[in-house]
Amino acid sequence: MQIGRRVFSLSVGALALSACMPGGPGQPQVARPDPALEPGLRPQPNAAYDAWVAAFRDRAASRGISQATLDSAFRGQGFLPGVIERDRNQTEFRRSLEDYLAIVAPDDKIVFGRRAYASQRSALNAVEARYGVPADILASIWGLESYFGTKKGKIPVISATSTLAWEGRRGRFFESNLMDALRILQTGDAVPSQLVGSWAGAMGHTQLIPNAYQQHAVDFDGDGKRDIWSANPIDAFATTARFLTNAGWRKGLNWGQEVILPQGFSPSLLGRRSKRAVSAWRDMGVRGARGAALAGSSAGIIAPMGVGRPAFLVTHNFDMILRYNPSENYGLGVGYMAGRLAGAGPLVGQFGRDATGLTLEDRKALQRGLSRAGFDAGTPDGVIGKKTIAAIEAYQRAQGLGVTGQPSRALLDRLG
Ligand code: CA
């Protein structure tokens, strides 16, 4: 954990959590499990976990957490097997850049996001003026982390972090976050019902884990609370901007841009750490997509799906976005969405055909064909996930075909 902050935006999205605005006046002051959550995300009996919590409470008390805080924090909390499952299956959420962008930045989300960006423009501009992090980058992070404040996660943070601390794979990390979550309650920054978020304890508009909150949270609007949870996202914007500034964000430097590589560009030159003078890239024939000038003084070039697919010049500030989440796809998602929010069009580079010979449009057509045939393939987004695979398998079974669950041209033609 480089800086004590990991983002699990895909996990939040994959749970299809709906909007949640906890903590308003008159709401219960206990973080109750939402009845809409799957059973594994509601507390289950576990004596070993309970014993761990009892010992942890002693450790927390010895570090200054009051009994009153502990009692209110742990009321209604418990062991959540579902968060362990998610922690172990993170690799399943690893996606190609093409799939990732289709998931986190589809066209309807960009339309929604442009309205959300406009509605928060003055707040974002004020935060940019203070910290030097561009408004569109902050709005983009907001979009990737919580779908512009509408999907902040509903899993109780005390239950999630205590379950993962007990389970132990990253026990120390999650115990530290559990302790910081208790400090958030003890100082009155939040009430227990507000402490809900992702399976890993990331909370609020920009999905900060308790460690990151304690290191960087800002009361930007001066109301006396560092509030990343309620309807007004301005403190969350400022906290994220401060996080990036503390990490080393350079004011006035763009994250990067899409580029067109010259014929014969060697893949050995790729890598965000293989930085060169931008003038050297220009001399090699690297051009900005849509004729844009190459910006910055020093940058690397990345092409996550290989030379011939979309490629990007990335600067020091791209590395700073990766301090928020270490995935290059995440960093590119933030940069891409920021551009789209600011009015730019889609990528110029083409992803082309996947390993099964299908393009994104082919895969969408396959999903629509399956659903038309009565096998629900989910949203026709071109991403072959569990639901699409299950639909293919069910279709193959029903048709007496070999059951592979694999998309293919033959299958697409058959569904035609
Ligand atoms: Ca505030």
Image (cartoon, grey):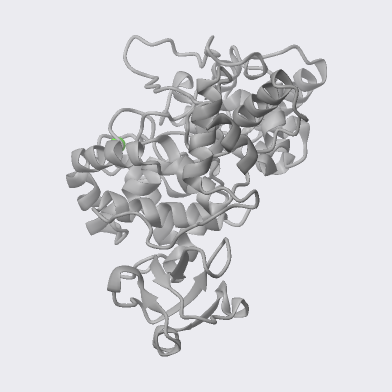
Instruction: Return the residue nearer the eye: 19 or 305.
Output: 305
Vertical comparison of 253 with 103: above or below: below
> Ligand 1 is located in which of the four quadrants?
top left
- Residue 372 percent coordinates (x, y): 50, 21
Please name whichever residue, 269 or 11, is drawn nearer the observer in this view of the structure: 269
Quarter of the rendering containing residue 206 = top left
Q: Position of residue 363 (x, y in %)?
A: 53, 40
Identify the residue shown where x is 45% and y is 31%: 187
x 52%, y 54%: residue: 329
Place of residue 184 in the rendered image (x, y in percent of width and height, measured from the top left)? 48, 33
**Which of the pair 88/203 is nearer the observer?**
88
- Residue 403 sits above or below residue 193 on the image: below
Which residue extends farthest left? 122
Q: Is residue 12 visible?
A: no
Instruction: Classify residue 288 as left or right of residue 115.
Output: right
Q: Position of residue 323 (x, y in %)?
A: 52, 57
Residue displayed at 48% across by 21% down: 192
Q: Is residue 62 visible?
A: yes
- Seen at 32% across and 46% down, the residue is 139
